[in-house]
Amino acid sequence: MHGAGKPVILHSCGNFGALYDAIIDDPGYDAKHSFEDVIEPVEAAYERLHARIAVLGGIDVDYVRRRTPQEIYGRSRAMLERTGLRGDYTLGTGNSVPDYVPAEHYFAMTAVAPEDR
């Protein structure tokens, strides 16, 4: 895809700790999606990876399902404040959002995103 001028994004679940060098360096992924709190919270993954690869999503789906809208909004806002000036992050969930996640919980996360971007 790089030959076509397109970014290459890896979506994959699991613990990639020992594989990140290979993922980033060859074939040279530009971004990684799918993070889970039980493996590595997105906040920690971002601090470790953002200088080398963009971090996509990462607000754990189980967190979005179980926590209150206020907690979800707070964590999402904190993540955007953490990453705002440094970049290499896109707000989103850690994986696909199943239908058993309450809509108001999902919308609590997305309400944080600035509308002017």
Image: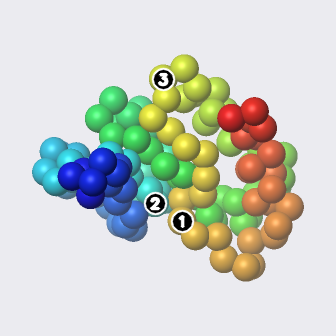
- Please tell me which of labels 1 and 2 falls first in the chain: 2
Q: Nearer the viewer, residue 48 or 91?
A: 91
CA gap between label 1 and label 2 equals: 5 Å
Residue that extends furthest to the front in the rendered view of this protein = 4
CA gap between label 3 and label 2 equals: 20 Å
Judged left or right of residue 112, residue 92 is left
Residue 84 on image: x %, y %: 58, 26
Name the image quarter holding the N terminus. Answer: bottom left
Query: Residue 98, located in which quarter of the rendered image?
Result: bottom right
Q: Which mark is residue 86?
A: 3
Residue visible at 54% across and 51% down?
Answer: 57
Q: Amino acid at mark 3?
A: Arg
Residue 49 on image: x %, y %: 34, 38
The answer to whether residue 44 is visible is: no
- Please tell me which of labels 3 and 2 falls first in the chain: 2
Q: Which residue is mark 2?
A: 34
Q: Secondary structure at mark 3?
A: loop
Name the image quarter holding the C terminus. Answer: top right
Q: Secondary structure at mark 2?
A: loop
Q: Amino acid at mark 2?
A: Ser
Do the residues bearing badges 1 and 2 touch, measured as CB atoms within 8 Å? yes
The answer to whether residue 40 is visible is: yes
- Tell me if residue 72 comes above or below residue 103 in the rendering: above
Query: Residue 96, located in which quarter of the rendered image?
Result: bottom right
- At label 2, counting other C-alpha atoms closer than 10 Å, the crowd grade (few under 14, some 14-19, many 20 or more) is many
Q: Which mark is residue 95?
A: 1
For marks 3 and 2, give the one nearer the viewer: 3
Q: Nearer the viewer, residue 70 or 49?
A: 49
